[in-house]
Image (cartoon, helix red, strand yellow):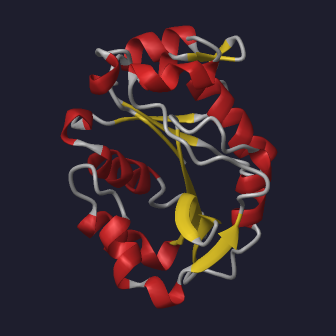
Amino acid sequence: MLLAAGGGRRLGGRPKALLEYGGRPLVEQAVAALRAGGCARVHVVLGAAAETVRARADLTGCVLVENPEWATGMGSSLRSGLASLAGSGAGAALVGLVDQPGIGAAAVGRVRSAYRGSGTLAAAAYEGRRGHPVLFGSAHWRGVAAGADGDRGARDYLRAHAATVALVECGDVAEPYDIDTPGDLWRLGGA
C-alpha cells in the first residue's frame, strides 16, 4: 500500500505524488519500488489533486483508493488504505510513503520477507530506529485503523506493540529521508 494523498502544504501546495524524480512522478517511482520488492497488488491512496495524479501518472494495475479526508493527515489515508484491503484475502499490508524516494525495492523486499502470518508486525530500521516501510499482518489492521489519527498514522500502535515489532535493518540499502519542504527538493535533482 502506498500513501500518496498529501497536498504538500509545506511545499507550497505541490502534491507530493506529482513531484518529479528520475523523470517520473514520485508516485510512479514508489509503485515501481513496491512491485520490484515483491508486492503483487499495490493499493495507492490518493487525495490532493487525485484527478491530476490519475491523469499524469501511470498507475496501471494499481488499486486506486480515494481519501476524501486527506487534508486531516496521514491517519485518514492509512484508514482508507486498510479499508480497501477488506475482503481482498491479503494476509498483510506493507505500507510505504510517496515522499521517501530513498527507500527502494531492496528495503521493501527485506521488510516483506519478515512476514510470518497474520500476526506479523515488522518495520524497516535505520541504525536501530524504526522507519518505513512497515508491514502489518491482517490481525492488526483493525487496531491500526482505530488509532490512526491526524499525522500520527500507526506510530502509537507500533509503540504500544514495540515488543512484537520485528525490526529489519535497511540502512545499508535505503535512505529514509522525506521530501517535506522546498529545502528537501535538491534530493530529487532540483525538482
**Does 153 appear above or below 147?**
above
- Outermost residue, bottom direction? 163
Residue at 65%, 15% in the rendered image = 189
- On screen, residue 8 versus residue 191, left or right, reads left
Residue at 50%, 16% in the rendered image = 18
**131 vs 81, nearest the viewer:** 131
Q: Position of residue 51 (x, y in %)?
A: 40, 14
Q: Does residue 59 show up?
A: no
Q: Quadrant of residue 4?
A: top left
**Does 102 appear above or below 131?**
above
**40 vs 100, nearest the viewer:** 100
Name the quadrant of the C terminus: top right
Q: Position of residue 60 (x, y in %)?
A: 66, 24
Residue at 77%, 46% in the rendered image = 105
- On screen, residue 15 versus residue 105, left or right, reads left
- On screen, residue 76 versus residue 113, left or right, reads left
**Does 120 appear above or below 153?**
below
Q: Quadrant of residue 14?
A: top left
Q: Position of residue 41 (x, y in %)?
A: 66, 46
Q: Does residue 51 show up?
A: yes
Residue at 27%, 24% in the rendered image = 9
Q: Position of residue 16 (x, y in %)?
A: 44, 24
Give the mark count: 0
**Does 3 appear above or below 170?**
above
**182 vs 79, nearest the viewer:** 182
